[in-house]
Image (tube, rainbow, N blue to C red):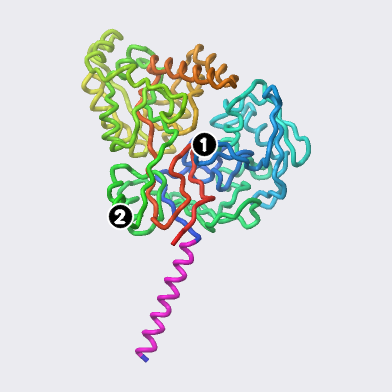
Amino acid sequence: MRVTKSIALASAGLLLATSLAAAQSTEIRIGVPLEPPALDPTAGAAEAIDVVVYQNVFEGLTRIDENGAVQPGLASSWTISDDGLTYRFSLNQGVTFHDGTSFEAEDVKFTFDRILAEDSVNAQKALYSSIADVSVIDPATVEFTLSQPDELFLFNIGRGDAVIVAPESADNNASMPIGTGPFAFLQWDRGSRVILEQYGPYWGEKPALTKASYVFIGDTGAMTNALLAGDIDGTYNFAAEALPIFESNPQFQVLVGTTEGETILSTNNAKPPFDQLEVRQAMAHAINRDEIVEGATYGFGVPIGSHFAPHHPYYLDLTGTYPFDPERARELLAEAGFPDGFSATLKLPPVAYARLSGQIIASEFAQVGIDLELINMEWAPWLEDVFANKDFDLTIISHVAPFDIGIYANPDYYFGYDNPQVQALNEELNATTDEARRKELAQELQTIIAQDAVNGFLFELAQTGVWNAKLEGMWKNAPVEGVVLRDIRWVE
């Protein structure tokens, strides 16, 4: 009996192991540092929303691939008029939303009318301001008329802010998202995880994964332990200081790439004393980027001197505009009426790069007489107080939206910068299709906001992913916000 029982137990163990291996081959658990405040990317600014739902639950007319190129999405093809003002899209047919309702041209019109409505809460509404009209030609054809040419139109409609939603479900997408993507929303355990499952009737190529769990782990130590224990299968942007634990471990792969994340010391330009150019210049001279890059990103960040990604062909290196010079910083503060410096608050969201950068900047600013009170905040209060209500002096955040220099042309944006010259240049940039002229305009914009020291420009955030060595198909780079599941699979 003992032998029989042992054989039975061994067999049961083998079956269990086989079952777990089979489950593992089609399911994935991804550690994410921030829980999204909601799950509708068309009605919220948080990157954490797109991390879960972009190209997974929701899709746009176009989609952006890992290299930042525009690919067909819900639109199978399109034509553009000679004057660049009319785009006609042919839509894929047989597409359904996850509640079984059909996707048609009327859904596209609804989506963009909602984005452009007077009461719209879309975080990137300005990107779509060139849309003058959306017309339904027939259920499978929709036409956009622009008020002026927009070189980035096809890219921008492929972002998370412009994914297609249905009138039947749009009002509930914040908590019960319903899209057309390869994965349907299954459940949201608040404070713990979001679970997606493969959508059986998906219109496109089926992904290899059948289920994906996004597990919220805000602490680096806890994320490390979860990876080592096998409680999660990877994370897309791991704390750089802990990467050495995994770099030489054959059970893991470390993927280091680029992001669109300009990390800045966001400054309330509408609030004294930051409304004075000399004060902002003084802060710029007090910042030692090399020290911040080394201390906050462990050398993975790339120093920036303006709000533009270094890997972009339009990039202009302006890190020398206000070199690290504490003595000059003190002189400028005296000229601004603050010979003894001043005190201010620095509100920090719950991400490692912000908290670490904040500590370093507080030390640097203290050397020139600026006394910073560090206030650590959770994500939801930061979005409410800082981003929405503009109740802050200084903060640190990485702006991960691609080609987003246009935010400096919006005087209502949270850092309150109002420069008519920048607004006019940005309008011209948006309407210009000539590549050489676009580069000139983009570099002129970079130069002005650098000289105005609108914000403290710190570094471009790197993407540092840690994944199980048996996974493939993860994006190394992040040309847009999101952790796209469609190509991820387990391999032997």
- Main SS of the magenta part reads helix
Viewport quadrant of the N terminus: bottom left
Residue 377 position, x and y percent, is 37, 36
Q: Nearer the viewer, residue 193 or 487?
A: 487
Residue nearest the viewer, comparing 332 with 167: 332
Whether residue 411 is visible here, answered yes or no, is no
Label 2: few (<14), some (14–19) or many (≥20) C-alpha neighbours in 10 Å: few
Compared with 293, 368 (above or below) is: above
Q: Position of residue 136 (x, y in %)?
A: 75, 35
Quarter of the picture containing the C terminus is bottom left
Q: Residue furthest right?
A: 138
Q: Is residue 451 magenta?
A: no
Which kind of residue does numbered mark 1 sit on?
A: Gly
Helix, strand or loop status at disc 2: loop
Residue 84, picture quadrant: top right
Q: Which of the two residues, 102 or 192, is positioned nearer the viewer here? A: 102
| Amino acid on which the number 2 mark rests in the picture | Asn
> What residue is drawn where x is 43% and y is 31%?
311
- Mark 2 vs mark 1, CA separation in Å: 31 Å
Residue at horizontal 26 percent and vertical 35 percent from the top: 295
The first of marks 2 and 1 along the sequence is: 1
Mark 1 nearby-residue class (10 Å; few <14, some 14–19, many ≥20): some
The residue where tag 1 is placed is: 68
Q: Which residues are magenta?
A: 2-25
> x%, y% of residue 318?
37, 20
Residue tagged 2: 249
Secondary structure of residue under mark 1 = loop
Task: In this rendered view, identify the residue nearer to me: 402 or 167.
Answer: 402
